[in-house]
Every structure is written in C-alpha cells, then in structure tokens.
Image (tube, grey):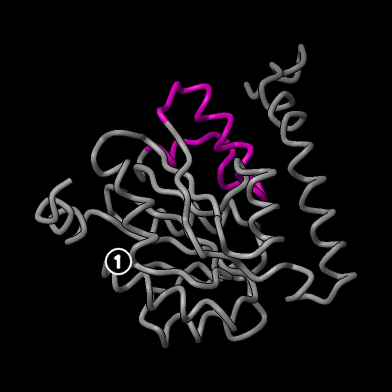
Amino acid sequence: MTSARMRTVLSGSLAVVIPAYNEQDTVGDVVRVALGFTPDVVVVSDGSTDATAAQAARAGAHVVALPSNAGKGAAIHAGLEATGATFVVLLDADLVGLTVEHLRTLTEPVLSGELDMAIGIFSEGGFMTDFGNRMTPHLSGQRATRRAWLLGVPRLPLERWPEPAITYALKNDNVRWGYVELPRLSQVMKEEKRGFWQGVLYRTRMYLDLLTFRRRRKQDAQPDAPGHGSG
C-alpha cells in the first residue's frame, strides 16, 4: 500500500481499541504509541479498580468505563461500539515495547486487502512471552480486521475471553487470516502484575474458560426443548 493510501485510511477509518482491566502502569504508554498511528484510540476500562481510566484519558484516549468487570469480550464490544471506523486494531493494555512500526506491520495486510484479519505474534521480545505466544498464537490479543465483521462474531460480548469465539468465526466464515511477527514486543506476565500465585490462579481460570467455549457454543446451538419455546 502506498503511503498516501495509508494516510487516507488512517485519517478517520481506522481505530485502535484497547480493553483494559487494572493496567494503570502500562496503558498510558500503549495509548501514546497508538495515537501516533491514528487519532481514534478507545480504551475500555473493564471495571478497573485502579487508575487505568485516568491514565488512559491523560494519555489522550477516548475512555469507556464499564461499571463492573464484564470480561474482555464485553470490553472489546463496547470499544467497537464507541467508534465508527471501518477498520479496527485490537491491542492488549499491558504491552511493552510497542512502536508505530508494529502497528503498520499488523494493519498493512488488512488495509491492502491481502487478509481479512492479521494476528500479531511476538518475536525477540522475551523468552516467556515469545514462548507463550507461539504455543497458543490463536490467543493473541494483537489483531487487525474490519470492525463490522468483528461486531458480528457470535457470543463476542458474552465471552470473558473471546479469542476462541473469534477463531471459530474465522474458520466458519471462511475469512482470510494469517499471522505477522511483531519483533521486540512483549507484555507484562500475569504473575508479575498480580503476584506469582494470584497470577497462576488467574491464568488457570482463563484457560479453563477458554477450554469450555465449545460446550457453551453447542448449548447455544441446541433447539429449545419441546414445550419450552420462546413463543
């Protein structure tokens, strides 16, 4: 894509949406980098009890504050509804080392029409974050896609961790998607943010929730039992 075409797209048709729960230490830096790429940056504070919302606002983001912790899916959905952009970039709020070049790398395949969704994978950012990201690349929070498609993902606002729902929709809709490497980018590990044992507990709950997505989806797909229709 030419630089002129990129500037046209970024002038009002691309937004960055950052779901955040208690990320006061890092969200401001992520916002400032994102604002160097597009003026439309939305942070959704998902019931944060720290200064996440204040730090995001101070950095220049449009902040949507949810009254309680509803989960990442609900936060992303709220962020999508807060912008009218054609394209959207999703970023985690705890990224370390983010640059505008990372955002260009992530969005280029989508803006050029090569892919419908690009998923960012860490490289050279740190052993643990690189390892975890490459073991489960489909769980990456760094993505670029069309806002309208993402809004149509079934169960998006209902899933505390929406990545399996997005992956299922990608495959079911025959969407063109692929991975792009984001060198020297990492994020703060949950064990660092919450303390080791609290971090392990949080991670365990996250994976249990992710692993039970298929069951929830199948339950949604079951027809109402006889005599119990919505009428």
Q: State the residue in front, 230 or 86.
A: 86
Q: Residue furthest top?
A: 226
Q: In this picture, is 53 found above or below 225? A: below
How far across and down, in percent of the image, does residue 145 sit? 38, 43
68 above or below 165? below
Question: Helix or strand or loop: what does disc 1 sit on?
Answer: loop
Q: Is residue 37 left or right of residue 33?
A: left
Which quarter of the figure is the C terminus placed in? top right
Q: Residue at x 74, y 42 (%)?
A: 210
In the depicted view, which residue is nearer to us: 56 or 224? 56
Residue 73 screen position, x and y as percent: 58, 51
| Figure quadrant of residue 61 | bottom left
Magenta stretch: includes residue 151: yes
The three-letter code of the residue at mark 1 reads Asp
Q: Is residue 172 magenta?
A: yes
Residue at x 54% of width, y 34% of height? 154
Residue identified by numbered label 1: 40
Q: Position of residue 221 (x, y in %)?
A: 66, 21
The boundaries of the magenta stretch are: 149-176
